Amino acid sequence: MTTHHRPKDVILVGHGMVGQRFLEALVEQPGAADWRVTVLAEEPRPAYDRVQLTSWFSGRTAEELSLCPPGFLAEHGIELRLGDPVAAVDRAARTVTTRAGHTLSYDALVLATGSYPFVPPVPGHDADGCHVYRTIEDLEAIRAGAEGARVGAVVGGGLLGLEAAGALRAMGLDTHVVEFAPRLMALQIDEGGGALLRRKIEELGVTVHTGAGTQRVETTADGRVRAMALSDGRELAADLVVFSAGIRPRDQLARDCGLPVGERGGIVVDEHCRTEDPHVWAVGECALAADGRVYGLVAPGYAMAETAARALAGLPGGFTGADTSTKLKLLGVDVASFGDPHGTAEGALEVLYSDSRSGVYKKLVIGRDGALLGGVLVGDTEAYGVLRPLAIGGKPLQVAPEQLVLPAGFAPGGPVALPDDAVVCSCHNVSKAAIRSAVADQGCGSVAEVKKCTKAGTGCGSCVKLLGTIVTEELEAAGVSVDTGLCEHFAHTRSELYEIVRFKGLTSFSELLARHGTGEGCDVCKPAVASIFASLGNGHILDGEQAALQDTNDHFLANLQRNGSYSVVPRIPGGEITPEGLITIGEIARDYGLYTKITGGQRIDLFGASVDQLPPIWQRLVDAGFESGHAYGKSLRTVKSCVGETWCRYGVQDSVGLAIELELRYRGLRSPHKLKSAVSGCARECAEAQSKDFGIIATSTGWNLHVGGNGGMTPRHADLLAADLDRETLIRTIDRFLMFYIRTADRLERTAAWLERLDGGLEHLRAVVLDDSLGICAELDELMDRHIGSYQDEWAATLADPDRLRRFASFVNAPGTPDPAVTFVPERGQIRPARPGEDGHLLTLVSGPRLEVRTA
Amino acid sequence: MTVDVKVEIHDGSRWQHVCSYDDLIPGRGVAVLLDGDQVAVFRDRAGTLYAVDNRDPFSGTYVLSRGILGSRGDTPTVASPMYKQVFDLRDGRCLDEETAPDGGRAVLRVWPVRGSQHAPVEAGSRA
């Protein structure tokens, strides 16, 4: 068939989280190329992560919150018009008209207008100082308002209200939460859980008023908020008010064009998310789903977006309701609720575990037939990953329910088996069976591969731990050994070996092998153990038995290149170098005929040296004040920097000074893999710090610390670990981050992969290094102090020891004779390795200042 | 009492002294020139000597003497520092790949080696 048809026009109204998901789902459908998509959005920026909105206060930028990957719209030919919402729909003509007056026609109209915050219509609700908590602009207004404020009141003790309270508290306001219901988070959790949550939140300095309605917002003569009058007669002084009393579907467009809406709002849609008009769909918070509910959570919104995209492509599928389970951390308190937490079913029974001393509350709702119906967890949500799928599965439990709530150690029996149809990832609706099939039938061999293949665990991430367990079980069942040991010689992981070496104070590989391993070792375990010894401060890496463990790069303190020659990289801290330094390096390179190139880390690499040449080259470098750059080691490479406020018109801090300080502090620190760092002097980020293992970006008041970034094969944007730190706190936090990484990472695992794998992720890392949740910070600090105290330049120390120097011989029976196989040819005025069949020349050991480079 | 044990390689016609036993670090190697041939000589932790071609058939570079010794099961091995293929030190066979990129068999030439002073140390025996 070669029919020439015009593309069909899809207009998406609203570019929030659900709108973006709709676009992503639509472009994946067969025949997606037939659609011409236009997005009309009210907000001034593309879709961003509203679930993580609060993290904006702790330094995450609007760009970092963005959900629309760069290039996504262009790649799929999607036109996005920001700041121009749809004002009217003409269903008969199938057109929409925007606020700016543009009229566009559609074949399919998808409404994803979301919801608006409900503000109780009390007197004074719109006074100066009253806010809502929904968009980045709202947060900007709250931050501006908080500057001159002392007391903040949040109306509404639900999920968002508590987040808002946390934000106000963090900005130093005396914070109150006013909740009409008798407990906090009344929708999700029960009375017992609510009481515990309240106590924990009050411990953080937030005052909670439950069972209290807001009657009036009192204002000053000039119309500013002064106080709130509560329904119990009290008056609460406050100069900033945030309304967070629930949300309402934004269905006005539908109402205006005569589409049916629910009694309490929401555009009525069927199970395909289609409205009464076959050309109009509605998804997300603005829609009243086929089960008669309006869903205010992102996971059901995503499911609706996918349903509508499939429906547009003519594919089957439907949305008839969703799981509203949630697990979150509110003001540092873990809270989860799943299934039916209130036990509304007839004959439902409760199993309760409550320990006020340790602040843990767990309730399970069990049906008459023994099935798990739902539950509430406060203070310890570890079991959520297993309990939620069990509750959704609705099958009778195979174990006594109390086993599911008792703390580890009290519960008898092994882990709980999930049924195959249990939904493990509710963001992407992935069942346990689908995950097992990805491993068994599609050959996925790791959590990362399963994530890629099924999308499980890529939404909110709360199921990743469970995902790991299922993948491991399935691999084991398939006979794939998921041996976490380092190699055939050690059944331990790198981090386990680190702990063994540290606790037992071992300093010899032979002893470690004899007591904890088998065989002779190999090129995997030997360098890994050498690195552990070096991380724990075990003297020079070429001393004693350690010398035999090092990779060739570490063994010759230089980098092996493809023809068997080595390259040399002197340290240039922060990339700052004097003209004399440059001249010295240039003279050495010229005298030895080395190829020179500027590295990505702001240093100079000198290529083409033989092992015999390394000591004399380094003698000259050390004499000129240079030291080892550790380019050959799994250790700190460079701390790159932009020029900073000293010179740059835009800089706000001295990035070069900090970069030098950091590079000198961490130089020589051996780690599971190489470490790269950078410091940018302002938010323009010219040093590309967010692509580094630890990157620092100057703010007007301090430094933001980003960790876990990576360039290379699998780029990863670094996560913001902490914001606006002073110099001392910044350095202490980096110390701990590095030492915690060194202690717990696998062999050759960069910080990016390590952070992805870390149980509890960034939050856990924050808790460990900022709040000392594991009580190990003193140890980490001490280890770093020991490293700094015992640092010595490896090359200077090598040159000072004839025994170490003896190893730098090309041939033990003919030292100084160059390897006849290492030859070079000229290229662009320098040397390069000769290729097979090329007639190259040797570089002689000590050449004169004019090595001949023929450019002919 | 230290005894200077000489390490000798048989070049096909005679034993040639190439270095002293003490030049060898247990678990590492050295390169020697033997009438134009490059030979990698190793001493393992137990003291056994091995001598194989210094040329790594996978990269074509003469670097095997800079590899790390180890074991795979009961086989004593050296790993190439270039692309990490592992070779059996006793017969020179590559344990990871049978064929080198040039199409040839990935097997290193093995040289007879001994430590000689009062009692010669033969290849495969303890010093």
Image: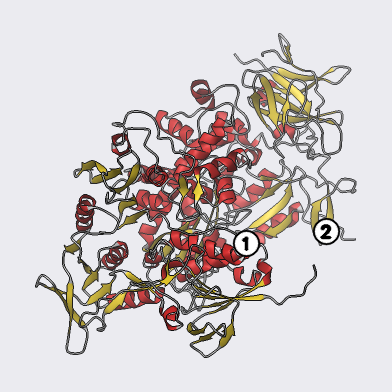
The residue that label 1 is drawn on is A28
Residues under labels 1 and 2: Cα distance? 48 Å
Determine the chain carrying the residue at label 2. A
Image quarter where the N terminus of chain A lies is bottom right
- Tell us which disc is closer to us: 1 or 2: 1
Where on the picture, by quarter, is residue A298?
Answer: bottom left
Left/right of residue A172 with respect to residue A451 in the rendered view: left
Q: Position of residue B72 (x, y in %)?
A: 65, 24
**Camera sees residue A647:** no
Relative to residue A95, is residue A817 depicted above or below? above
Q: Position of residue B25 (x, y in %)?
A: 64, 27
Where on the picture, by quarter, is residue B8?
Answer: top right
Pointer 2: residues within 10 angstroms few (<14), some, or many (20+)? some
Q: Nearer the viewer, residue A401 or A779?
A: A401
Amino acid carrying mark 1 in the image: Glu
Amino acid carrying mark 2 in the image: Glu
